[in-house]
Amino acid sequence: MADLSTTYMGIALKNPVTVAACSLSCKVENILRAEEAGAGALVIRSLFEEQIRHETGELDAALAKGSESYAEALSYFPAISHGEAKEHLFWVGRTREATKMPLIASLNAVSPGNWVAYAKQLADTGVDGLELNYYRVEADMTRDGLSAELQMLDIVASVRASVKLPIAVKLSPFYTSVGNVIQKLDEIGVNGAVMFNRFLQPEIDPDKETVLHEMTYSTSAEMRVPLRWIGLLYGKHSLDMAANTGIMEARDVVKALLAGATVVQVASTLFRNGIGHLTSLRDGLNAWMDSKSYASIEDFRGKLSQQGFEGDSVMFERAQYLDFLMSRQRWVKA
């Protein structure tokens, strides 16, 4: 049997299959089932600042800036109730006491000061790490991309200076230069990058002339964006990379590791197949490693990254692009 153990942000994991922040972790029973099914770690559903704010005017101002939708919410306008910060913190602490596997808290705030305040409170619950779920829709046309990136980096730097826990940042794939953002996070002292945050987009019903807010599960096809960037950036920084979105089967786990991911985060596949599917993902990875005679994950991690590319690594991006176009051309002629 292969050795599936790995280390994510300095946290020892039995295997790289982790549960992403989602509503499954709203119940301690689900987290215990995930632990029993073999999860390497679990990211607890985010603490949202909007759930804490009670002043309607302040909340409306935040929503107007384009921060109105969240990847983990079932609605683009989640229910607001007072005092949920204490409830969330109590629940996280209770979960920590009930489980042995590594737990990572997740935070999604709006105002810079509260990122730090809530990060400190989450750190006191006994979790092993902290994931900053930086989800923001930049809809302000007067705001340039550099300003948006600098604000995110300033917030992360403030949190990094305030807590000792390992920190990961859940990123968007839509930065002008994802690699440069990773480099800046590395300089700040961030320990991991989750690639990527899945943006849930509104749908329109033309018959009822209404905007629909529906939760749709991800598919394996959506994995290609994180797979691409992880492969390009592996070995060029010191952050551990978590592949997020589209990991449905054991083969997807293998793909992410071959590209250079340290761990994978799964959610949609658990909603589709049940929490017990974690066992299939773990055992499938082990079976693949045995079939290839790999004794440990480090034997093949990053093998198909740009760094591991045999030949001219500078041509890594263009070569794959041209190969795809040529294959499509041959298919059309046929």
Image (cartoon, grey):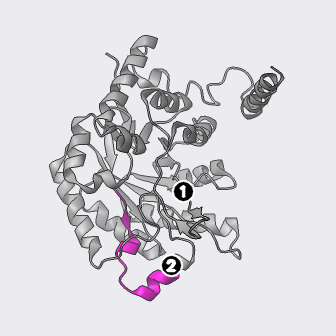
Identify the disc placed on residue 199.
Answer: 1
Does the CB distance between marks 1 and 2 fall below 8 Å? no
Is residue 159 placed above or below 299 in the rendered structure? below
Q: Position of residue 11 (x, y in %)?
A: 34, 42
Q: Is residue 181 magenta?
A: no
Using the rendered image of the protein, determine whether residue 44 is visible from the camera's viewpoint: no
Cα–Cα span, label 1 and label 2: 18 Å
**Magenta stretch contains residue 55:** yes
Circle 2 — which element? helix
What residue is at 34 percent from the left and 57 percent from the top? 45
Q: Which of the two marks, 1 or 2, is nearer to us in this view?
A: 1
The disc labelled 1 sits on which kind of residue? Phe
Where 264 sits versus 122, above or below?
above
Label for residue 276?
none
Considering the image in quadrants, where does the C terminus appear? top right
Decide if residue 40 is on the left or right side of residue 172.
left
| Residue that sits furthest to the right in the current view | 333
Disc 1 is placed on an element classified as loop
Tell which circle, 1 or 2, labels the residue nearer the N-terminal end: 2
Question: Which residue is denoted by mark 2 in the rendering?
Answer: 62
Q: Amino acid at mark 2?
A: Ala
Label 2: how many Cα within 10 Å (few below 14, some 14–19, many 20+): some
> Which image quarter: residue 8?
top left
Q: Residue at x 53, y 33 (%)?
A: 260
Which region shows up in magenta? Answer: 45-61
**From this viewpoint, is residue 62 visible?**
yes
Q: Where residue 103 appears, x then y in whole percent? A: 29, 49
Q: The N terminus is located in which quarter? A: top left
User: Which residue is more in the foreground, 204 or 70?
Assistant: 204
